[in-house]
Image (cartoon, rainbow, N blue to C red):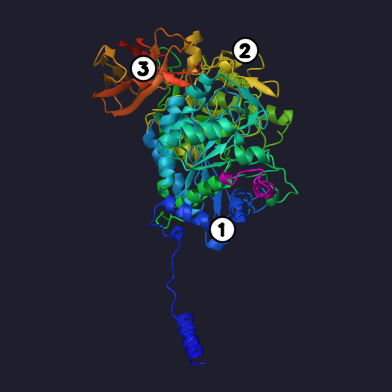
Amino acid sequence: MKTRIITLLALVTFLSAPIKAQTPIYLDDSQPIEARVKDALNRMTLEEKVALCHAQSKFSSAGVPRLGIPELWMSDGPHGVRQEIQWNSWGSAGWANDSCTAFPALTCLAATWDPEMSAIYGKAIGEEARYRKKDVILGPGVNIYRTPLNGRNFEYMGEDPYLASIMVVPYIQEVQKNGVAACVKHYALNNQELWRGHINVELSDRALHEIYLPAFKASVLKGGTWSIMGAYNKYKDVHCCHNDLLLNKILKEDWAFDGCVITDWGGAHNTREAALNGLDIEMGSYTNGLTSESEFTYNDYYLAHPYLKGLKDGTFPMSTIDDKASRILRMIFRTVMDRNRPWGAFTSEAHYDAARTIAEEGIVLLKNAPVTKKAPALLPIDASQYNKILVVGENATRSLTKGGGSSELKVKKEVSPLEALQAMYGDKIIHAQGYESGRPMYSNTDKIPAEVVESLRNEAIEKAKEADLIIYIGGLNKNHLQDCEAADRITYGLPFGQDELIKDILSVNPNMVMVLMSGNAVEMPWVKQVPAIIQGWYPGSEAGNAIANVLSGKVNPSGKLPFSFPVKLTDNGAHAFDALSYPGDSIKQVYKEDILVGYRWHDTKKIPALYPFGHGLSYTTFAYGKATLSAKTMDSNGKVEVVIPVTNTGTREGKEVIQLYIGDEKCSVIRPAKELKHFSKISLKPGETKEVKFTISVDDLKFYDDSRGEWTAEPGKFNVYIGASSTDIRSILSFVLQ
């Protein structure tokens, strides 16, 4: 009995003793992320792992509530944080505090040719996403501008893989400093909207690696992006959102990507492929990514119960779910479970300043000629010379942040060009709308009554007769079949009768400054008659102020085109062949221009562009001095330095983008006449000279040898072209690779 009493007392003492709590490693953010991922993974059930892999609402995926691991919240980008969407509907949640800053469209950012602007952009949009408690911002976009008809080109960074590769990296890095994952999209070959959900893209391995993958590769290897969004289309007959070659082989093996692959909304189509081919998070299934709803629940997704069943019965190896869950946990620990991430900011003056500065740096002066030989150029506008300035065009007042698809924004502030010009020039400004486009909608366009069209046109023409200067602010907008997701443009010319309107106005008054608002090149049948043309893009919240500052000369334009403007559509490489090249036969399309995209096509085929890649004028002038090479030969491990003195020979402070292209004089394969390999944007005061230095390495000389599956440079002579655009070449040098 005594022994039993002692034993009982010992047990009571043991049970009543305080138990030392052990904090799980995954909650301790002082621990390495990989240790935290492993610890959390070991504590999770199979069901909890699978739950991470698919949506739980329109824009969120599950965490692990039992372990205190929070869910992930995503938001559309890439030009601003989208308004809050309902849990299980595409309708607005009706919040009053989700009106964001609209930053310029990414075509405008690319047109700055300035990585510093990209960093400013990424920092600001990252702060807005963080303030709105978003963990993933769905952007930036880096699909290559292949055709000017692509409805989504305005979300991308132009036609050149090197330019896009340089510009995307600071955006990603600065976004992620806020503890928000960038999600680079749309990987890969989503270069048109027509039939995007099923079109199978056929192209050479060279074109894939030289043109369409470099910006994604830079996003991973240099930007360190934490997530990537798959594309809707197919490649090698497999949807890109679960494509073994793109996701497993290239992205995760060759590039060692350690982040998450997220579907575009509705981009998954098959449980087996989704399980095995590299997809990590499935969003938006059983919808078309835009409007249609479904009776299926989130647990019916391909990576939900069907995947769980396949794991349990051995159809899919457990290694697949452990890899997916590890990647998702890694992103959670980098974002929502990072206790040190900043709080962010929303619609601040600093963000408006950023939006305006980026827009000003990206606006491109395409043409600036006098109306007559003895007259000065129309720009910058000297207000003292004019009593009455007529502003014509719907885009002078229309909100260009609405419409366009998933990049549509609910903005707190948007300054229209008309407002800004009225503030700058007062009662000298009069206005005529000139044309009507209809509402910004996805699925239809409005038929404008003929009497309305005629009335608006007649008003503009009559007012033009009395005006001293006309500022035409037109172009495209975010309507369906224009710069808009889910459909491509139908025609290359301006819509809504603008070409005829412009012609009629010029017939009564030639003193016109054209401001084109678009994310795409357009046909310009009136180009010889219009003295001054500015490409204004979609500049965001500070649109009007940026445009007014450039028109007035308060800001000297310094933007350069990130894509070519063909004279006519068939001058573009994608449209130079039959319909199988563009738009395809609805099942497949073949990239028949191969590596000759954009200026590569124009220069190599000797088909002049209306406005070439890299083109952009200034209100001052720049003289390029004699360029020099540090050596006439290079070995496979060597480098050659190029030095170019550049002088501001005008009377205004300004910025110039010095561009370096390289051409391989003789090669065993077809190569473009020249390819952009370096650029530098510099600021110069009047009379000031700066030396610009570039270092050429053997990597700048390589092409992708698809017969060997590797990058190579063949010995021989290489030409170095220094220019202000792809056609405005100021110096040509050469060296030999030994």
Q: Label 3 is placed on what type of residue?
A: Gly
Q: Are the residues at dot 3 and dot 2 in contact (C-beta closer than 8 Å)?
A: no
**Residue at the spot of label 1:** 64
Q: What residue is at 36 percent from the left and 23 percent from the top? A: 678
User: Which part of the image, by quadrant, shows the C terminus?
Assistant: top left
**Dominant SS type (magenta):** helix
Q: Earlier in the sequence, mark 2 or mark 1?
A: 1
**Residue at the spot of label 3:** 723
Which numbered disc covers residue 585?
none
Q: Check disc 1: other Cα within 10 Å, few if <14, some if 14-19, many if 20+.
A: some
Examine the rendering and report whether any part of residue 104 can be seen.
yes
**Residue at the spot of label 2:** 577
Q: Earlier in the sequence, mark 1 or mark 3?
A: 1
Q: Label 1 is placed on what type of residue?
A: Val
Disc 2 to disc 1, how far (Cα)? 53 Å
Q: Check disc 2: other Cα within 10 Å, few if <14, some if 14-19, many if 20+.
A: some
Under circle 3, the secondary element is strand
Q: Label 2 is placed on what type of residue?
A: Phe
Q: Nearer the viewer, residue 50 or 135?
A: 50
Under circle 1, the secondary element is loop
- Where does residue 49 sit, x and y in percent of width and height? 58, 52
Q: What residue is at 45 percent from the left and 60 percent from the top? A: 27
Does 256 sit left or right of 685 as displayed?
right
Q: Earlier in the sequence, mark 3 or mark 2?
A: 2
Q: Is residue 57 above or below residue 189?
A: below
Does 555 sit left or right of 689 as displayed?
right
